[in-house]
Image: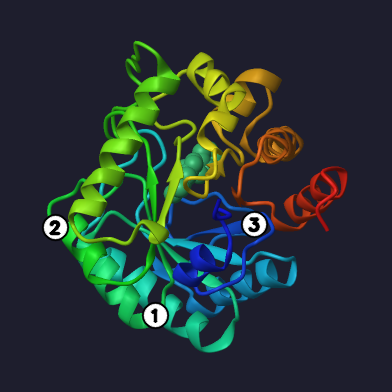
């Protein structure tokens, strides 16, 4: 069997990730509450500040940076394509010239995928799994790796009435449909990653059932990305506010890694890198 993050799969992302990878969250939207203060001054993104934040994550051991210019937090409003391009492309260009990690475009927008690929990105991370008009064609036209994430509904309304007949089966069926759509559009299987989409149109019970069954997705067919950092499921379990969820997030990441997850998306890069090293030592892998 081909290792899900073996040489063939790493190639699509342009980096070696035969060991679980830590993906650092870089949110360039003004509503981001990320620690270290705002990246904005007089309503403009401070490119130097954003770049420095990225370099710090690389120094802490991130091997992927996930760069987003549209807020996908529950209840958030959409932004214009121009806004999103203006936030994301200059940062990707600068990072591509100066850091040796994989650059991920957190976007659902076809033009951001095309221009981001030109600017030197390695991965398309689309929470809508290429369902926007033109997104599948745009992604297929690049040679970037693609992370297909499950979301029920749209960010604005997804937490109103999440419903599944069987959350693990429904999410799995959805991801298989999107994989088929990609393959039909000519995307090489080796470019695809999957993600159950924690918090995206899911109740606490749904999130817990998905995490309990994360090994079902980690069967070796596709690398599995898990994004739980700071999310409301941690708040619901611990009663902690968004800035106090680091330990809860590390517990979830550790559990996911034990069950075979391949990429952890997080705001807390240094701590998560340590968790990856500890879990891999326990598993006897390097
Ligand atoms: C506090 C902090 C509360 C952040 C909520 C949030 C995922 C993702 C996001 C994910 C993949 C978020 C872009 C949501 N989550 N991409 N993106 N997987 N692949 N919310 O789980 O961080 S943004």
Helix, strand or loop at disc 2?
Answer: loop
Q: Give the image location of residue 125, x and y in percent.
A: 40, 55
Q: Which residue is mark 3?
A: 22
**Quadrant of residue 188 within the rendered picture:** bottom left
Helix, strand or loop at mark 3: strand
Q: Secondary structure at mark 1?
A: helix
Give the residue at x 74% y 33%: 251
Q: Name the residue: 59% across, 82% down.
A: 99
Which residue is at the front of the view, 51 or 147?
147
Q: CA distance from mark 3 to mark 2?
A: 29 Å
Which mark is first along the chain, 2 or 3?
3
Whether residue 241 can be seen here: yes
Q: Which residue is mark 2?
A: 134
- CB under 8 Å between discs 1 and 3: no
Q: Residue at 41% across / 80% down in the picture?
A: 120
Image quarter hosting the C terminus: bottom right
Disc 3 to disc 2: CB gap under 8 Å: no
Nearer the camera: disc 1 or disc 3? 3
Is residue 131 placed above or below 215 in the rendered structure? below
- Counting from the top left corner in percent of width and height, residue 179 is at 30, 45
């Amino acid at each position: 069997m081909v290792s899900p993050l073996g040489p063939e799969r790493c190639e699509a992302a342009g980096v070696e990730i035969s060991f679980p990878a830590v993906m650092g969250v870089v949110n360039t939207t003004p509503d981001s509450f990320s620690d270290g203060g705002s990246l904005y001054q007089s309503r403009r993104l401070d490119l130097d500040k954003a770049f420095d934040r990225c370099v710090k994550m690389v120094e802490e051991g991130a091997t992927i940076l996930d760069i987003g210019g549209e807020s996908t937090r529950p209840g958030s409003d959409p932004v214009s394509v121009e806004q999103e391009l203006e936030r994301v492309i200059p940062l990707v260009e600068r990072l591509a010239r100066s850091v040796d990690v994989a650059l991920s475009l957190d976007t659902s927008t076809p033009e951001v995928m095309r221009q981001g690929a030109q600017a030197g990105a390695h991965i398309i991370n689309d929470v809508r799994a290429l369902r926007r008009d033109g997104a599948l064609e745009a992604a297929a036209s690049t040679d970037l790796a693609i992370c297909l994430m499950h979301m029920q509904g749209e960010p604005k309304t997804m937490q109103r009435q999440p419903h599944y007949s069987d959350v693990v089966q429904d999410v799995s069926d959805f991801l298989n449909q999107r994989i088929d759509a990609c393959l039909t559009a000519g995307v090489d299987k080796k470019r695809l990653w999957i993600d159950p989409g924690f918090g995206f149109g899911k109740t606490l019970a749904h999130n817990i059932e998905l995490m309990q069954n994360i090994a079902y997705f980690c069967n070796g067919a596709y690398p599995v990305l898990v994004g739980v950092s700071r999310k409301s499921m941690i708040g619901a379990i611990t009663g902690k506010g968004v800035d106090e969820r680091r330990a809860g997030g590390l517990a979830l990441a550790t559990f996911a890694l034990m069950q075979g997850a391949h990429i952890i998306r997080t705001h807390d890069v240094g701590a998560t890198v340590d968790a990856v090293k500890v879990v891999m030592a326990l598993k006897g892998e390097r």
